[in-house]
Amino acid sequence: MTTANIKTLVEEMVTPYLEEQQFELVDIEYVKEGSSWFLRVFVDKDGGIDIEDCGRVSEYLSQKLDENDPIPDAYFLEVSSPGAERPLKKEKDFVKAIGKHVYITTYEPIDGSKEFEGTLEAYDGDTLTVTVNKKKHVLPFNKVASARLAILF
């Protein structure tokens, strides 16, 4: 089973429970680090997720994974908050991040750079407008490699 298939299957398993609890699925990772595999599920909710919430999601998902046993490798299950620098993955993430400080990387240079840290001014589905040091940059969405909230010091 491919990594993408595992992520999709886990999303299908956990989403009904998350919706019932009014939690949001932020991201799923299935990665190998050294000789170990990790299945990481990042969840959030309005007001922030706490350790008890993560524990309940972990128990639910662990039971579902044990019942179905879809992952052939041994792995560690981790359920956690996305943290203050949460990734921006879905359209609604970008919409909620308008006006906030973000860090964006692109696949190729735009305006001479592949890294942009500043205020997300706009998102229209096709482009992101980011102001970095008073200069606006319009980034085609299909050129964005990664995006996350950033803490401003």
Image: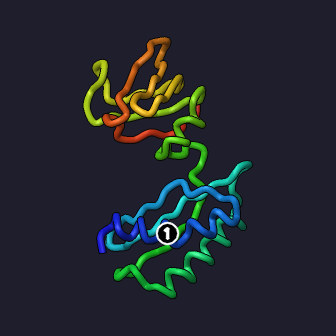
Q: Which of these two is toward me, 95 or 52?
A: 95
What residue sits 40% from the left and 19% below the top? 137
Classify 28 as above or below 73: above
> Image quadrant for the C terminus?
top right
Q: Which residue is mark 1?
A: 12
Q: Position of residue 127 (x, y in %)?
A: 40, 28
Classify 123 as above or below 51: above
What residue sits 34% from the left and 64% below the top? 4
Residue 136 occupies which quadrant of the picture?
A: top left
Q: Is residue 12 left or right of residue 34?
A: right
> Image quadrant for the N terminus?
bottom left
Instruction: Look at the image and tell me whether residue 153 can be seen.
Output: no
What residue sits 35% from the left and 29% below the top? 140
Question: What type is the residue that disc 1 sits on?
Answer: Glu
Classify 144 as above or below 44: above
Residue 129 occupies which quadrant of the picture?
A: top left
Q: Position of residue 7 (x, y in %)?
A: 41, 66
Q: Can you name the residue that lies furthest to the top here?
A: 134
- The number of numbered badges drawn on the structure is 1
Q: Is residue 132 left or right of residue 36?
A: right
Classify 17 as above or below 67: above
Q: Secondary structure at mark 1?
A: helix
What residue sits 37% from the left and 73% below the top? 36
**Crowd tier of the residue under label 1, counting other residues whose Cα lies within 10 Å: few below 14, some 14–19, many 20 or above:** few
Instruction: Look at the image and tell me whether residue 44 can be seen.
Output: yes
Q: Colour mode?
A: rainbow
Q: Can you name the residue that lies furthest to the bottom here?
A: 67
Q: Position of residue 41 (x, y in %)?
A: 52, 63
